[in-house]
Amino acid sequence: MARIWYGYVHNSAANKGKRMSFIISQIVSSCLTLLIFGSALFLTGGCAKMDASQCRNADWEIIGFEDGSAGRLPSYLSNYRKACAKYDIIPELDFYLRGHANGLIEFCTETNGFLSGKKGLEYNGVCPRGLSDNFLAGYQIGLRFYIVSSAIDKMEFCLRNEQKKLKELRKELRHKEEMLIQDSTSESDRRRLLNETKDARLKIERLEKKIFHTRKDIQMKQYEYEQLSIQYGSQG
């Protein structure tokens, strides 16, 4: 398993060995509950497409393992059941659940929790008792990265819009100032243009201040992100 960079102490291999039977039983129990009551998919969804040959020759334990290691709920089996029903083939539940349980051991790690949280993926409780603590420890840290990163993206989007608006206001102001000094401009138009240029300058001044504060806010969030990276490692 990849080294965890965000500072949690892992269970030793010996302790993991002692707990493995308990974990497997908890996974299978959780799987059966989820299959009965159903739930939303985590990370991946959609329909499983299988032809007659694939349904007949399927290794349901391997398929279960692949789904578990991908973070899919055991209820995903219903997609295979629907796909294979047209060929009068029923997936082997026991084999699927056994493979799925082993797949969850691969998936429910601090590393995957961190990566899932950092991507802003919603966690639906796929990890059973005995594995969920490690996953959630990483997930909560990754989610902090995601929240800060999303805030930076949002503020940078606002900044681009503000800068675009500022450019338009400055262009508009220049045009009005040019109109002011033209000999063909009437006195009434000149008075109107004077008021309009005054308003334009005030708008520009307010927008420049707003841009200044937006940049400061971005810098603060960038600093916060850097501190998270320092605290939890360069791979953050």
Image: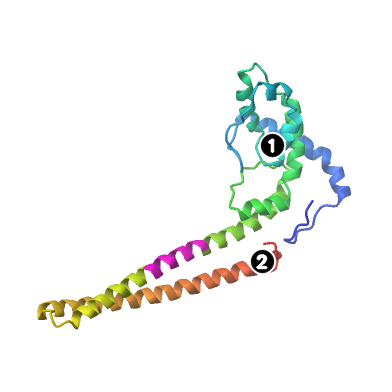
Stretch of the chain drawn in magenta? 153-164
Name the residue rendered at 67%, 18% in the picture.
Answer: 89
Query: Is residue 46 found inside the magenta-colored segment of the image?
Result: no
Up-down relation of residue 202 to residue 127 (above or below): below
Where does the C terminus fall, quadrant-wise?
bottom right
Above or below, 214 against 97 in this view is below
Residue 67 in which image quadrant? top right
The residue shown at (58%, 32%) is 47
User: Which residue occupies the extreme top position in the image?
Assistant: 88
Residue drawn at point x = 72 percent, y = 53 percent: 111
> Residue 39 or 189: which is nearer the viewer?
189
Residue 8 visible from this viewpoint: yes
Residue 229: give its label: 2
The residue that mark 1 highlights is: 67
Q: Which amino acid does label 1 sit on?
A: Asp
Give me the residue at 17% from left, 81% from top. 182
| Location of residue 75 by image quarter | top right
Q: Residue 215, which numbered label?
A: none
Closest to the observer, 164 or 105? 164
* Mark 1 burial class by Cα count in 10 Å: few <14, some 14-19, many 20+: many
What separation in Å lies between label 1 and label 2 (alpha carbons)? Answer: 31 Å
Q: At which x and y percent is residue 129? A: 72, 42
Give amino acid for label 2: Ser
